[in-house]
Image (spheres, helix red, strand yellow):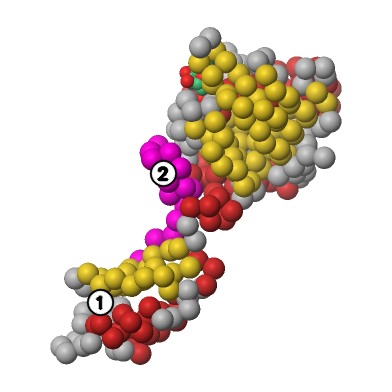
Amino acid sequence: MPYVCVDNLVKKYGELTAVDHISFTVERGEIFGLLGPNGAGKSTTLNVITTLTDFNKGEVVIDGMDIRKDKNRIKQLIGMVPQDIAIYNHLNAYENVKFFASLYGLRGSRLKKNVLEALEFVGLSDKMKEKPRKMSGGMRRRLNIACGIAHEPRLIVLDEPTVGVDTQSREHILNSIKLLRDRGATVIYTSHYMQEVEEICDRIAIIDKGKMIACGTEPELVSMVTDVKSIYVETRLPVGFDLEAFCKKIKLMPGVKGVKAEDYVIRVDISIGQNGTERIIQEFINNKLPLDNIKSEVPNLDTLFLTLTGRELR
Ligand SMILES: Nc1ncnc2c1ncn2[C@@H]1O[C@H](COP(=O)(O)OP(=O)(O)OP(=O)(O)O)[C@@H](O)[C@H]1O
Ligand SMILES: [Mg+2]
């Protein structure tokens, strides 16, 4: 049985349906991503799962427990890292993490050990005495994460934990999330950064305007739109070169869907599964065509979003 089951979830704010019949499951020990633009309903969905918000319709079952019946037991399983940083400015980093961990009943030596471990985990061991107002945005984000994980939750829910952080902090955060998964936690993660979701999530649900538009692994999602990538080779044609014959020959190679020559660039569309790039490049070399520049365009989740909604993800 999946660790989290969300079935036909509906959440309305007055007239607005923020979550519109969304269903998905999250397996134990996976990182599940919710990807969608501003206002898609990501935070609302997470707030329902973490019992912070009630809902109008549908079912949510976590670790076999119905969220409506076992709210308090479910709360104990969850660690939430909210989108809006929730830490106390008058407490230092250590005291902040200690406060949140103690809310879950941790006491004494276990409390101390877990707080120190959580701070080390997010790379803030040397900032324990520092108060949040003196920290950079990236450090505050990392402290926010430490506060959500110190009680060793089995389900960790992170709502855009990398917004506004530098590349180094972002890498640190992403690696930490993978480590939490490797240690056995189940993770639900939201972002509107396609690359991040692609990098860390085992499976991804794409949502837009409250509705789920696609769900699966990244290759599954991408293959929903197209299985064709484009290779662009910039070259110079020797005098008298028979371009037409060359293009015809490439066209007949396995997996090739199309060939187009424009100015100095020859574009070859090829099935992703075919792995034919090397053979095509070899054909250029065999014909003594210089390889001035080679670029390939592989469809990604942005392509999928654009195809399904007609809009860019961001
Ligand atoms: N407390 C609220 N009261 C009324 N409307 C709300 C409330 N919270 C969210 N909404 C609306 O519900 C919709 C979904 O919002 P939500 O915050 O879940 O989106 P999101 O995907 O998390 O977006 P973002 O990427 O901007 O965080 C939006 O139209 C938002 O304006
Ligand atoms: Mg949000």
* Disc 2 from disc 1: Cα separation: 31 Å
Residue 22 locus on image (x, y percent):
62, 30
Residue at image coords 53%, 56%: 223
User: For the view shown, which residue lies furthest in the left direction?
Assistant: 239
Asked if the beta carbon under badge 1 is closer than 8 A to the nearest atom of ligand 1, the reply is: no
Instruction: Say whether residue 106 is visible.
Output: no
Residue 110 locus on image (x, y percent):
83, 28
Disc 2 residue crowd, few under 14, some 14–19, many 20+, Cα 10 Å: few
- Mark identifier at residue 306: 2
Residue at image coords 47%, 25%: 39
Task: Give the foreground label among 2 and 1.
Answer: 2
> For this rendering, which residue is in front, 138 or 159?
159
- Mark identifier at residue 22: none
Residue 66 locus on image (x, y percent):
80, 23
Q: What type is the residue that disc 1 sits on?
A: Thr
Is residue 38 left or right of 290 when viewed as pictured? right
Helix, strand or loop at mark 2: helix
> For this rendering, which residue is in front, 263 or 150?
263
Residue 88: quadrant of the picture: top right
